[in-house]
Image (tube, rainbow, N blue to C red):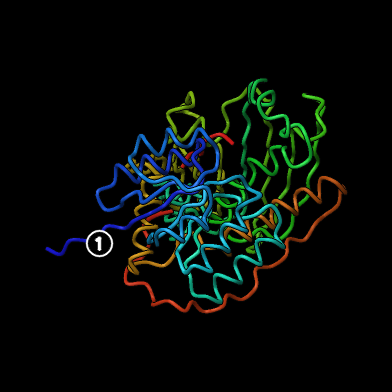
Amino acid sequence: MTTRRCVRIAVAGSGLIGQEHIGRIADNSETELSGIVDPAPASREVADRYGVPLFGSLTELFAAQRPDGVILATPNRFHVSGGLECVEAGVPVLVEKPIAETADDAERLVAAAEAAGVPLLVGHHRRHSPLLAEAGRIIGEGGLGAVVAVVGTALFRKPDDYFDVGPWRKQPGGGPILINLIHEADGLRALCGEIVRVQATASSAARGFEVEDTVAMTLTFANGALGTFMLSDAAAAVSSWEQTSRENPAYSHADDEDCYLIAGTRGSLGIPTMRLRTYAGDASWWEPFESRTAAVERHDPLAAQLAHFAAVVRGEAEPLVTGRDGLQSLRVVESVLEAARTGGLVEVPAPPVRTPSARTQPTQTPSAPAASTQN
């Protein structure tokens, strides 16, 4: 039996999500933590705990060693500059979501990675969730018929100290559209195809901040399906992925709640309960449904994302969530912001034709499409 090569990974950023990645690298027998990049004084304790060198910048890291891959868990404003530095060094990089602060910046990073043939992955780790994978399989194999309607919610209440410790979250750029909706946009794109048009109405009445706290959206998908989505970080509800999926133990959970309902011409699926209702015969409201719960074997999406990144580094797989995926999900979010600002109907820019990768073709299909650490 052939032993797989151990992949040496450096992590830039030792904050909350950075430490989630660091712990999983240490726990995986096929990955090794090669170093931590973070100029903050508190990062010394993290590096000492794992017995790895600490670097103040990616420049220092690459001068001292060449890891097999880098995970960028830095603040959003450093994603593009850090990603470009990894690309220039020829080192595969997994950039935490969002890929950039703006789609224009993301395009620069994506173009550079494709031109250099350096793998660029984006940390939309829900794509590695077994729940999303099974839902995608059911929908993709026609288990619901043609998808016609999508109902989604991300309703939760952030505590007051969330804003006290991060006052920037009360200002433009800190609302739930940019912080939280990026997960939903990527997940719905994975399940139902491209979102091509959006409308939105936003309110800041609950908290009174400069940024929105509640948003109502309508979505048009490329296949003609329509969707509605409610987002609020001021709602005392449990209708969010974090509080229904049971994939992040830091959150309280409501096991019998769904945050997505996907309805097709022959059936519907609630996610994450995975309750599936389909017609056996004629699809008619006069007919009874056959009901079942789709079986899902649970695993940790962040750990699965790490294993996938290692497989990409070894040349065994192509990225499941590419830079272009991260860019397109960001375009959806930017379109929602524009629709909320103008009150109009906004067309989402279409994904450009992908430049062929300079790397070898995949030798295995990436494993399935994560609950998030709170931003």
The answer to which quarter of the image holds residue 354 is bottom right
State left or right for residue 375 relative to residue 367: right
Amino acid at circle 1:
Arg
Residue positioned 46% across, 35% down in the render = 245
The answer to which quarter of the image holds residue 314 is bottom left
- Circle 1 — which element? loop
Q: Residue furthest left?
A: 1
Residue annotated with mark 1: 5
- As rendered, which of 104 and 255 lies closer to the eye? 104
Task: Rate crowding at label 1 as few (under 14), some (14 to 19) or many (20 or more) other CA atoms within 10 Å.
Answer: few
The answer to which quarter of the image holds residue 286 is top right
Residue 205 on image: x %, y %:
82, 26
Residue positioned 66% across, 55% down in the render = 330
State which quarter of the image contains the C terminus. Answer: top right
Residue 207 on image: x %, y %:
77, 24
Residue 260 on image: x %, y %:
56, 41
Residue 241 on image: x %, y %:
53, 37
State left or right for residue 139 relative to residue 316: right
The tally of labels here is 1
- As rendered, which of 270 and 18 lies closer to the eye? 18
State left or right for residue 241 relative to residue 51: right
Residue positioned 69% across, 58% down in the render = 331
State which quarter of the image contains the N terminus. Answer: bottom left
Residue positioned 39% across, 59% down in the render = 65
